[in-house]
Image: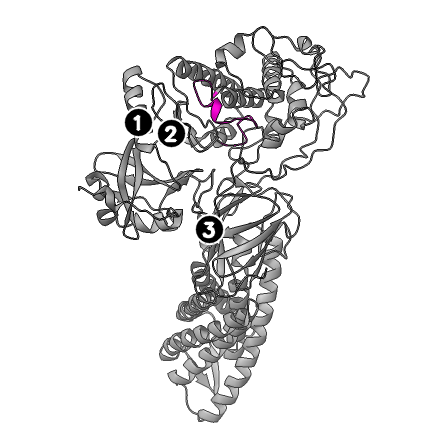
Amino acid sequence: MDVSQSNRGTTSRWPTGTEYAAAVQQPSTSFSDPELQTGELTLTPLGIPASASGQSAIAFHMQAKDRPVAVRCLLNEHDDGRERYKALQEHVEAYNVPSVVPAKWLDDGVRVHGQWWPVVVMPWVAGDPLHIAVEDRLDDPTRLSRLADRWLDLVELLQDKEFAHGDYQHGNVLLTDDDEFQLVDLDGIWVPDMGVGSPNEYGHPNYQHINRSDTDWGPYVDTFSALVIALSMFALAHDPGLARFMTGENLLFATPDFEDPDNAEIWRALARSRDDEVVDLTGRLHAFARAGRPPAMSVREVLDASFEPSELLVDRDPGASALTPDGLPTTTANDAWWVDTTSQPPPPVVSPVATTANSFWAGDAHPDISASQPAAPGAPGLAPAAQPAHHPPQPVPQRQPPPPGPPSVVTHAAARASAPQPTGLARITGQPVLAGLVGGAIAGLFGSILGGLLQAVLPDAKVDGGLFVGMIAAMLGGMVHTWPALNLSNYELAFRRFLIGAAVGLVAGIIAVFVADVMTRATLSAGDTKNAVLVAYVWALTAALVGLAVGLLRSPKAGAYAFSGGAVAGFAGGFVHGSTTAEFENRALQVNGFDARVLLIASFVAMLIGVLVAVAIRTARNGSLVVIEGPGQGTVIDFHASKVTIGGSNSDTLVVKGKELPAKAVQMNVGDHHAEATSDVAILVDGAVQPQRFAMYSGQVMAIAGVFIRLEIKSEFGQGVSQ
């Protein structure tokens, strides 16, 4: 398909990840490339396109005719993209560069809202992001140490072949099951004679020198980040307990560790290692972290340079950035983190923490990050100094402020198509409508069983239908109100919400039964045993009141919607009940609790009510918080007010447990299409660190304590944001 360049999108705002996700679901009309037009988009069990996101693009997984491919849709401007990828392709083919996934640039790749935008197409790599792969191998230190060696060998080989990636970090380094490294996201690569300037990004801040600039883009731009990765893997191989420093957005280091390397706890922990190689590499990397610029040398030159920890204890001008003859930065004798302080009392010994595979994603709580490790005997100049209190990473300013107006990116750096998908209870309770369906069925089943048990206690009498309906009403209220907490494994909150929902459901049921009793006595004659319409009215009244009561726990609007939904579902299900198993005796509805047909019909009626009440409540929402990765992945938390909070308290809209978050860690005032937010903890939005006050737009993704949350605001929600 020949698409004219003149059709290329010219608006200043690039499509968001959400807009791309909507467009690619029609491959035959959204793509210009014949291979993609006939491809099949991969969907997650939640029915959304399988994707992986980074700072500059979102990649979708497609099954083309002969191979699986990744289609990278760009989230911001790449002026030199065509030339950069052309130079990359020529260099990779000419020099046989290993571990670099081949990629093809298409100027007019995907059509969004009638405009064409470029895409990058490459083979889909079946591998885990590096931080996930490392966690999976923590119980095999030999394998992990071998991986660190292979990583250094690979980086040295790539530098020999005059290739630089530009953004080594956990999301761009994938590891296959057979421990092969694969490099993706090649927007910032450098090769000789590219004929284009430096990229408009500096890489992930948790892996880059704080003073990296355009002048560092060249053959040695990867040296610092490569050493960060190597040291992290070596250190974790020798001390898995260091996994307490892993946050889901790093391996071991975070930006504040590079901003203040003399006081950051991670450097002290590494300096106390019992492994000489870890101690040596720690000293080399620390020297560059303290220096005013990244290393202008290859990884091999850094590792081969003559270096002893004691050589760092030399006098120099505190403002200087001197180098040793081998090119390593020098440090002063007053470097507090490095000075021998053997007079200090020894730190407490903490046994390494047993970390299971993907323990972070499973929500395991890590030990106090300030806990010490045993001192390393015989490590010169590395005895531990007094331990400062560890403070959580604070937001840091962006090197380049974003342009004014709504952001155009919807990313989460750790999210990936191969991330564990919700299963079982998580998949059910994470989706409100599905939870309503299953919860309703369970409510009907248990209500009937309780009726059967009462009949067993009173074998000579049938269970009164009012009690039967009341029990189902209580179960419905409890189940509909408790599903989000179940999915987040917050059983304390789930139990509390169940009791609240069951209480309001029971009250609604009692009221409905009282009114229904008056109706039946006024309508039926003593000998009537069947009346399907009357049974339908009984159920409609019960379901409407249960829906109203549970909906009002969210908002008046949700209560009104749920009242209507419950009435419709109750009447439809009640008519089925009245036409089949329902019977009256002496003008009262009777139920045979051990009748299999009663169990089936009651479950069906309650299920129908649960679905329509859930749909009604969801329709009345102002927006949703969707957990797309981390503990509770797949959970959808609908909110019905303009005030939304995220934190560790059961009073928060979205409760994040196991991460030691304070209550109301993030507070949002949600408006028409965006929210004004304040945060007491470190927050990333679309991969960018945010200040204490920030704006977040519908479709963007927040990373907080390793949990990735997408904000979705209904377009018709028209309440303004208070300024």
Q: Which residue in the protein does label 2 denote?
A: 186
Percent x, y of residue 293? 56, 21
Q: How is the image coloured?
A: one colour
Q: Toward the viewer: 430 or 708?
A: 708
Q: Judge depth for marks 3 and 1 and give the one in front.
A: 3
Q: Nearer the viewer, residue 321 or 437?
A: 321
Residue 656 falls left or right of residue 10: right
Where, quadrant-wise, is the C terminus in this rendering? bottom right
Q: Residue 67 at x, y = what percent? A: 25, 34
The answer to whether one can see residue 526 in this image is no
Q: Residue at x 41, y 29 (%)?
A: 188
* Crowd band around label 3 with a 10 angstrom C-alpha radius: few (<14), some (14–19), many (20+): some
**Residue positioned 50% across, 70% down in the render:** 558
Sooner in the amino-acid sequence: mark 3 or mark 1:
1
Q: Which mark is in front, 2 or 1?
A: 2
Q: Which residue is mark 1?
A: 102
- Mark 3 secondary-structure assignment: loop
As measured in the structure, the alpha-carbon distance from the residue carrying label 2 to the one carrying label 3 is: 26 Å
Nearer-the-camera pick, 486 or 256: 256
Asked whether disc 2 touches disc 1, contact meaning CB atoms under 8 Å apart, the reply is no
- Residue 228 colored in magenta in the image: no
Residue 660, x across and y down, in percent: 65, 43
Q: Could you say whether the residue bearing mark 2 is in a helix, strand or loop?
A: loop
Q: Residue 406, which numbered label?
A: 3
| Residue at the (42%, 38%) spot, across then down | 56
Res 336 label:
none
Say whether residue 229 is left or right of residue 659.
left
Which span of residues is magenta-colored?
204-222
